[in-house]
Image: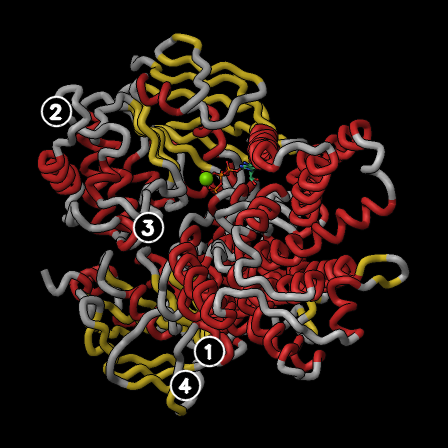
Amino acid sequence: MKHKSLGEWMQTLGSMIGLLLIIIILSVMSDNFLSLGNILNVLRQVSINALIAFGMTFVILTGGIDLSVGSVLALAGALTAGMLASGMDPVLAVLIGLIAGALMGAFNGLIITKGKVAPFIATLATMTIFRGLTLVYTDGRPVTGLSDSFFFEMIGKGYLFGIPFPVILMGAAFIILVFILRKTTFGRKVYAIGGNESASILSGIKSDRVKIWVYSLTGMLSALAGIILTSRLNSAQPNAGFTYELDAIAAVVLGGTSLSGGRGWLVGTLVGALIIGVLNNGLNLLNVSSFYQQVVKGGVILLAVLLDRKKSA
Amino acid sequence: MEQSIIRIEGIKKSFGPVEVLKGVDFDLRTGEVHALMGENGAGKSTLIKVLTGIHPRNSGEIYIRGESKTYTNPKQAEKDGIAVIHQELNIIPTLTVAQNMFLGKELKYGRTGILRSKEMKQKTIEYLDKLGVYIDPDQEAGELSVGKQQMIEIARAIATDAEVLIMDEPTAALTDKEIEALFKVIDSLKKQGVGIVYISHRMEEIFKICDRITVLRDGEYVETRDASTTDLNEIVKMMVGRDLGEQFPHRVRSEGEVLLQVKDISAPGYFENISFDVARGEILGVAGLMGAGRTEIMESLFGARKFKGGEVRLDGNPLKIKHPADAINKGIGLITEDRKGKGLVLNQTIRENMALTNLPHVSQNKIIQKKREQELVDRLMKRLNVKATGPEQTVGSLSGGNQQKVVIGKWLGIQPKLLILDEPTRGVDIGSKKEIYHIMNELTSFGVAIIMISSELPEVLGMSDRILVIHEGKVGALLNRDEADQEKIMHAATGGE
Ligand SMILES: Nc1ncnc2c1ncn2[C@@H]1O[C@H](COP(=O)(O)OP(=O)(O)OP(=O)(O)O)[C@@H](O)[C@H]1O
Ligand SMILES: [Mg+2]
């Protein structure tokens, strides 16, 4: 892995320097920025996008894309909230919520592989379907009156050793997923499929099956993000997760993962998610209007990607 | 005395710390065919790429018609009348044959940008006809066999009316019939004064068409000779630095029981009622013309394509294969003819590519065991004599022949019962060819059954125990080694023309 990971570090170098620069600038401009409280706050905000973006990294590595993550987040969050409101055991409700997300992802995967629909189109359709189902299920109103169980409160609002629980979830997911991608045969297959699918199939890799798993994983991670959000807000919003797919894709791309598949890594995605999170937070602290925030965010993404292209060319 | 169109002096080129060309001289005269020879990784393709401005050089001089030149991109070389057929095909699979043929030089109505499609299709047919093939100009190029794609590349280069034509292994994917036609074209170009640089590992071709031969070894310039004053053995000795002896190693026939029985399988449009069998320890050679359906038959057996009817048995038991993974589980390996498209993940390393077919072997509970992987890769690289900076070199940056060795290595690792090799020595140098033959013999002595598709008749005759000849998707003949010769095979392959 020696040569290769060196290359990966280089790929992400631009983003890392960018992240550092942004942090330095923001800490000079705002006294609050580098306070422990704010750092933990940023990390907590980042965790939701990061979890989705981790899944998105797998999808993009296989050469696909998943636009439905925001809708999966909303539907899984609403379902979980609904179950909790009806008095179901919170552990069970969360488990079912996660499985529901995985099944939505599996549905994406099935349409893409067995139905041979391009991932962009397939998930564009399911994005609308899942959002529609959320509206149907919630009747367009927030789902409230959830359980006040310690377990469910912990997920979105709790702390462990002073660290927000969502951040711990993000960290755990990161470690597990990095392990899967680097050390397991599954990870190898993900890269190979993105690099050359025909060659992978002829090498005995059941690419359809791998892809279905990858979309399921992304569905489950999106559901986890949805459950965290629901717990944080103590309610499920029908329009939760709207346009989250864009932030997730941006994080992946900022991290140096190639949109054509086969090349990239999760460390980069984490850096990408941090850039987006830090920017959001910093611009808020500086009282930049939310309209301008969008312009700055887009500009930074463009700049980072352009710098990366220059370097690798 | 002919005039030199191209003169190259003391070219040096390094990739990172590795020096690939160490001071190479070369010159090309008008109206000559000049062979550039050397083992896999000797630097032949790199020299061409440096000449045409794809890679910058570190030092040395290039003169075109006596004028010092440094191209920074291949378009400039093209403008100076240098056309190149690269070793790796540059066909865009989603474009049609005609679109590929005129890529970047589309015929238009004046400066309008409106395409003269009909004329381009017509011309495409004409150009291909010169090479003796017909390919529908509206067909998507990606659906064509590697051989046909190669013909498009050749036709495209010839159509430019260049003064210099550089061909990097143009015949690797072709069968005798197309090669024959190509040589006729080369002959007439020569008479028109075109200078031709010809790179090939098919030795018999070199002496058939070349006037002079330049040999490279490990990036060093060795010598330039008139073809008439040297012979094959001497050239090989210059290439590898020692005598190689007989090209085909002695083969002891050691047949066991029948392993694979194929009965009456068909795939409409590709092949029909194919029946044959292979025994343990046997090498079944499969000959035929380009497009006869040989590759399709083998891909079907391997689960990479669908076929209808008939029956396939392995060890007497019906064989149900839906996916290449099933075939691999049953101990069947397929070395594809299309190494770039179907054989390799080009942006991955040698290690990752070789491990891909061997994931169960190099892992435990689905977790990759680094040491096991490293051992496997080291063993395979040594056995196949892969020339690279190490197992971490990206496969895409290997020389063509070394890429082929990596493909073969992938499949030796699975310890197959039945190994199907589709053009296994394509682009492989003479020494390594012999290594591959040795490995095939060794495998059969352990009872492995081998099916070898090959378009090189000497190879088919030299290595096979029996020879299956396919003609237009049907079995044309099944010959025993002692009754087979080139004429009989060609007779059956052309349907008795
Ligand atoms: N882009 C590259 N980066 C690094 N090394 C390279 C690159 N291109 C070629 N090489 C190395 O340069 C050497 C010469 O390669 P080249 O392709 O010129 O060989 P060749 O003589 O054409 O061999 P073959 O007969 O197999 O086609 C090889 O060792 C190869 O690994
Ligand atoms: Mg070459």
C-alpha gap between disc 2 and disc 1? 54 Å
Disc 4 marks which residue?
B314
Label 3 sits on a secondary structure element that is: loop
**In which quadrant of the rendered view does residue B153 lie?**
top left
- Viewer-side residue, B302 vs B479: B302
Disc 3 marks which residue?
B173
Q: Would you call the spot at circle 1 few (<14 residues within 10 Å), some (14-19), or many (20 or more)?
A: some
- Disc 4 or disc 1, which is closer to the eye? 1
What residue is drawn where x is 26% and y is 48%?
A: B141
What residue is drawn where x is 22% and y is 21%?
A: B193
- Viewer-side residue, A45 vs A147: A147
Label 1 sits on a secondary structure element that is: helix
Disc 2 marks which residue?
B109
Horizontal and vertical percent position of residue A74: 55, 63
Label 4 sits on what residue type? Leu
Label 1 sits on what residue type? Asp
C-alpha gap between disc 4 and disc 1? 13 Å
Query: Residues at marks 3 and 4, common chain?
Result: yes
**In which quadrant of the rendered view does residue B91 lie?**
top left
Chain letter for the residue marked with disc 1 in the picture: B
Label 3 sits on what residue type? Ala
- Disc 2 or disc 4, which is closer to the eye? 2
Q: Would you call the spot at circle 2 few (<14 residues within 10 Å), some (14-19), or many (20 or more)?
A: few
Horizontal and vertical percent position of residue A55: 60, 59
Name which of mark 2 and mark 1 comes first in the sequence.
2
C-alpha gap between disc 3 and disc 4? 30 Å
C-alpha gap between disc 3 and disc 1? 29 Å
User: From the viewer's perspective, is B135 left or right of B406?
Assistant: left
Label 4 sits on a secondary structure element that is: strand
